[in-house]
Image: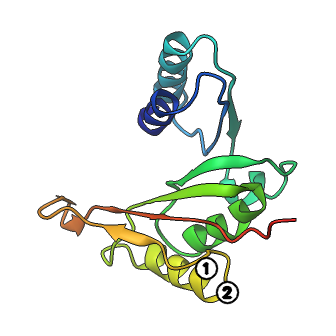
């Protein structure tokens, strides 16, 4: 819906570019949201790479992303695969934001634990879980961390 894109664009320099990977499976809704975002940030480069992130992210030339927000599928192998695949796109000084990083989302936390153990993340991301935030009985929250990137 463009919520995260709008937040990131408001919070960054006017020269910052936005590149999003999105399944893009609800065209009417997503096209309307993208039009709104582009209308409100006319001087920004905004690019959406459409399709399954487990396929599109590894097939994209390496980027140098300062902010990476992972908000993909919350089940099966998807979170872990997204964390692994996005590492190559992280800049040396990067900020990682992970949606729904709580024990209510088993695959999200399994992916976080895997990426931490394999040193994909610099260290285990810090959880922020506001009290009483939930959706359909599942706790909502996020993690903030950093990808492990070796400085050359």
Which residue position holds label 2? 118
Instruction: Residue lying at the far front in this picture: please name it.
Output: 152
- Where does the image place residue 112, in percent across and percent down from the top left? 52, 77
**In this picture, residue 125 sits left or right of residue 52:** left
How far is the residue under mark 2 from the one under mark 1?
5 Å
Res 129 quadrant in image: bottom left
Q: Which residue is painted at 68% across and 39% down in the image? A: 50
Instruction: Residue lying at the far left in this picture: please name it.
Output: 132
| Local secondary structure at mark 2 | loop
Mark 2 and mark 1 residues within 8 Å of each other at the beta carbon: yes
Which residue position holds label 1? 115
| Local secondary structure at mark 1 | helix
Label 1 crowd (10 A; few <14 / some 14-19 / many >=20): many
90 vs 45: above or below? below
- Where does the image place residue 51, in percent across and percent down from the top left? 68, 45
89 vs 116: above or below? above
Nearer the observer, 68 or 58: 68
- Where does the image place residue 47, in percent across and percent down from the top left? 69, 29
Label 2 crowd (10 A; few <14 / some 14-19 / many >=20): few
- Where does the image place residue 104, in percent across and percent down from the top left? 30, 74
**Quarter of the image where the N terminus is located:** top left
Res 122 quadrant in image: bottom right
**In this picture, residue 64 sits left or right of residue 41:** right
Q: Is residue 1 in sight in this rendering?
A: no
Nearer the observer, 111 or 146: 146
Q: Which residue is painted at 51% across and 60% down in the image? A: 73
Scheme of image coloration: rainbow
């Amino acid at each position: 819906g463009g919520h995260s894109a709008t937040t990131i664009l408001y919070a960054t320099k006017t020269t910052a570019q936005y590149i999003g990977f999105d399944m893009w499976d609800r065209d009417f809704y997503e096209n309307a949201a993208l039009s709104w975002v582009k209308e409100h940030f006319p001087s920004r480069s905004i690019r959406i790479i459409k399709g399954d992130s487990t396929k599109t992210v590894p097939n994209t030339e390496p980027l140098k992303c300062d902010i990476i927000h992972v908000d993909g599928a919350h089940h099966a192998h998807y979170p872990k695969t997204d964390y692994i695949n996005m590492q190559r796109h992280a800049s040396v000084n990067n900020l990682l934001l992970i949606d729904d990083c709580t024990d209510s989302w088993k695959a999200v936390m399994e992916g976080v634990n895997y990426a931490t153990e394999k040193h994909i993340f610099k260290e285990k991301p810090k959880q922020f879980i506001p009290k009483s935030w939930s959706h359909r009985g599942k706790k909502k929250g996020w993690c903030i961390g950093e990808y492990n990137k070796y400085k050359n």
